[in-house]
Amino acid sequence: MVVDSKTSVSDIENKFTELTERDDVAIVLINQHVANEIRHLVKQYKKLIPTVLEIPSKEHPYDPEKDEIMKRVNLLLGVE
């Protein structure tokens, strides 16, 4: 799915839910600024597969403090 300024949050939410419920998807790549739009769903998502990876975009800087995967990794490693 290509997200632009005309894409509604509900469309993003529906596609995220659809992709994370599929058995034939192993990884869901999502730009971090798009993940911020549906942060509540990303935070609730706890399955290992498909794995959700937040990636930077050219227009928006990456913020590791908002990345749920990095938060979990840091928690497991005992890093604050």
Image: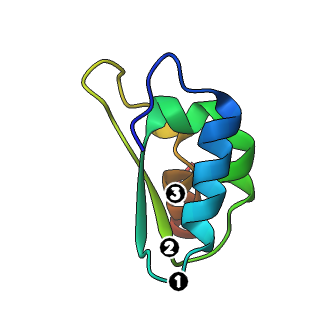
Between disc 1 and disc 2, the foreground one is 1
Task: Look at label 2 and name its amino acid.
Answer: Pro
At 63% across and 72% down in the image, what residue appears? 21
Secondary structure of the residue carrying tag 3 is: helix
Q: Residues within 10 Å of mark 2 (few under 14, many from 20)?
A: some
Q: Is there a contact, CB below 8 Å, between mark 1 and mark 2?
A: no
Q: Is residue 9 above or below residue 72?
A: above
At 35% across and 23% down in the image, what residue appears? 61
Give how far across and how far down residue 11 sits, in percent: 63, 38
Viewer-nearest residue: 59 or 80 = 59
Disc number for residue 50: 2
Disc number for residue 23: 1
- Quadrant of residue 22 within the rendered picture: bottom right
Secondary structure of the residue carrying tag 1 is: loop
At 67% across and 69% down in the image, what residue appears? 46
How many numbered discs, if any? 3
Q: Is there a contact, CB below 8 Å, between mark 3 and mark 1?
A: no
Task: Look at label 3 and name its amino acid.
Answer: Ile
Mark 3 or mark 2: which comes first in sequence? 2
Viewer-nearest residue: 3 or 47 = 3
Q: Residues within 10 Å of mark 3 (few under 14, many from 20)?
A: some
Secondary structure of the residue carrying tag 2 is: loop
Mark 3 or mark 1: which comes first in sequence? 1
Mark 1 or mark 2: which comes first in sequence? 1
Q: Residue furthest left?
A: 58
Between disc 3 and disc 1, the foreground one is 1
Q: Is residue 72 above or below residue 11?
A: below
Q: Is residue 11 above or below residue 46?
A: above
Mark 3 and mark 2: Cα distance apart in space: 13 Å
Disc number for residue 69: 3
